[in-house]
Structures are given as C-alpha cells and as structure tokens.
Amino acid sequence: MPAASTKLRVLAVSVIASLTVTGCQTLDDAGRVVGRADLVNDLAARLDRALELTYSADYQLPGGQSASIAQAQDPARSAYSYPGGKLTVTGEATTQCEATGGRTVCTLAPPPAAGSKPSVAVFAEAKRRGLITPPVVVGMLTAAALEPEAIIEQDDTTVAGHHATCVDVDRAGDDFVACVTTDGVLGSFTGQVDGEPVEVTLNRYSETIDSSAFDLPPGAGIVDRRSTTS
C-alpha cells in the first residue's frame, strides 16, 4: 500500500542511524565491504517501492501448497491468499477470511486510517498458515540488524527468472534467509518464525492482475464489524 512508504523510509533511516555507530560489516561476493545498515536499507527500500506497484505473485509452500499476493493502485488495494484463508486490504475494509469445516467466513474490519498502513498484527493469520508477508520480513530484518551479535551476509541469486538479493541472517534461535527481487518483490524466505519453520518461494510474477483477486471467496459468510457503537 502506498501509505506504507513513509513509515518504511523512516524505519530504514532509524536503522542506519543506529548501525552507523556499530560499524559492523560483511563482504559480498565481489569483495566489497557492505555495512549491515546498507543491506537493511537496500532491501527495505525495494520492499517500500513495491508497495506502489501493481503486480501479482504466486508462491510455492511446503507440501505442494501455494499462496499468492496481488496488489493494485488507483485505488490502492491488496490481497493475500494462503492455505485455508485470505486477507484483503482495501479502502472499504480489512477482511480476514477463514475456511473451517467446509465453510468460509469473512470478517470485515475498518480499513487502515488514511495515511497509515495495516498493523503487522493483521498479517498474523497469513504467517501462521505459511505465508510470510513483506511487512513481516522488513520487521525481522530490522530486528536482526539492531542485534549486535547477529551475523548478516549478502548473496545474489535468481528466483523465477528475476534477479534477487539475499541476506542470510544468523541470530540466536531465529536464523533465516530472505531474498528480494530488483523490483522489490519478496523472492523467497526460509527460516524460523515464532518458533515455526516457514518456507516460501516465488514461482510466478506478473505486472498484471486479475481483478477477481480482490473478491471474497464465493459463498462465504460475512461478519461485518466495521460499525461501532458508543
């Protein structure tokens, strides 16, 4: 969502300010000295720019399962589909859909306030079901960069035909590898999240979307919690 841009940039700047003091560095494949702040800032900036793109991305999950992310602009909206559920964020509502016992129920909550982005907590169910989202990855990278004992190394790879920069983070009890494409799309993630193994890999990326990506599942029950009473 475009509203996330300012916050992510502020986050990246604060990380740089903190890490400039530590002077922790590593080497990339070309032997260039890369500061930990540089790694975090570059990937955060890529993910930030991607919030203003229109695209769809399909991901492979373990066990043959799949997930997807779709984003569109004018108006800004996004959709995250994962095994057993779906999350949509539009100007009208933030909607969580969950399929249990052969029935799907979608709960509508108020949309993010103007000029803000969804809380990371909104993505908790997607994360629990195996789809880690870009805002969660940014938070994990930032936390690792601010940890003096963490070791962060850079590498380059190709994911689904797209060049990507990867960071291998080694920190106590929370190791992970995250790759971000040049366009700022999450290319892959492998690691521990809240003590559970998570693995996602991009297998298709397109700059076009199907408008139905933002539709709620057919036949879903609706619980509208957008109205408030005093």
Image (tube, grey):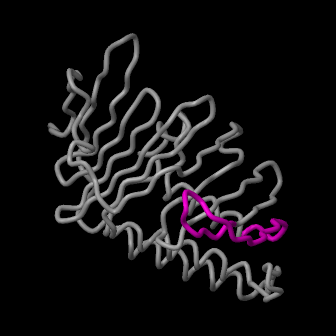
Percent coordinates x, y for residue 206 in the rendering: 38, 58
Relative to 52, say whether 198 is above or below: above
Percent coordinates x, y for residue 7 in the rendering: 42, 72
User: Residue placed at 66% from the left, 63% from the top?
Assistant: 143
- Kindly indicate the quadrant of the structure image that contains residue 166: bottom right
- Kindly indicate the quadrant of the structure image that contains residue 187: bottom right
Region of the chain picked out in magenta, as a range? 146-166
- Count how many numbered circles sit on residues in the image: 0
Between 183 and 114, the residue placed more toward the observer is 183
User: Residue placed at 63% from the left, 34% from the top?
Assistant: 62
Percent coordinates x, y for residue 147 in the rendering: 76, 67
Name the side, left or right, on which 152 lies relative to 117.
right
User: Residue placed at 73% from the left, 78% from the top?
Assistant: 36
Relative to 139, say whether 66 is above or below: above
Name the side, left or right, on which 154 lies relative to 11.
right
Between 115 and 34, the residue placed more toward the observer is 34
Q: Is residue 211 magenta?
A: no
Name the side, left or right, on which 112 lies relative to 98.
left
Relative to 158, say whether 21 is above or below: below
- Kindly indicate the quadrant of the structure image that contains residue 35: bottom right
Q: Is residue 149 magenta?
A: yes
In the displayed orientation, state which residue is furthest to the top: 101
Image quadrant where one finds the N terminus: bottom left
In the displayed orientation, state which residue is furthest to the front: 161
Image quadrant where one finds the C terminus: top left
Name the side, left or right, on which 4 lies relative to 42.
left
Percent coordinates x, y for residue 30 in the rendering: 79, 85
Q: Main secondary structure of the magenta part?
A: strand
User: Residue placed at 39% from the left, 39% from the top?
Assistant: 81
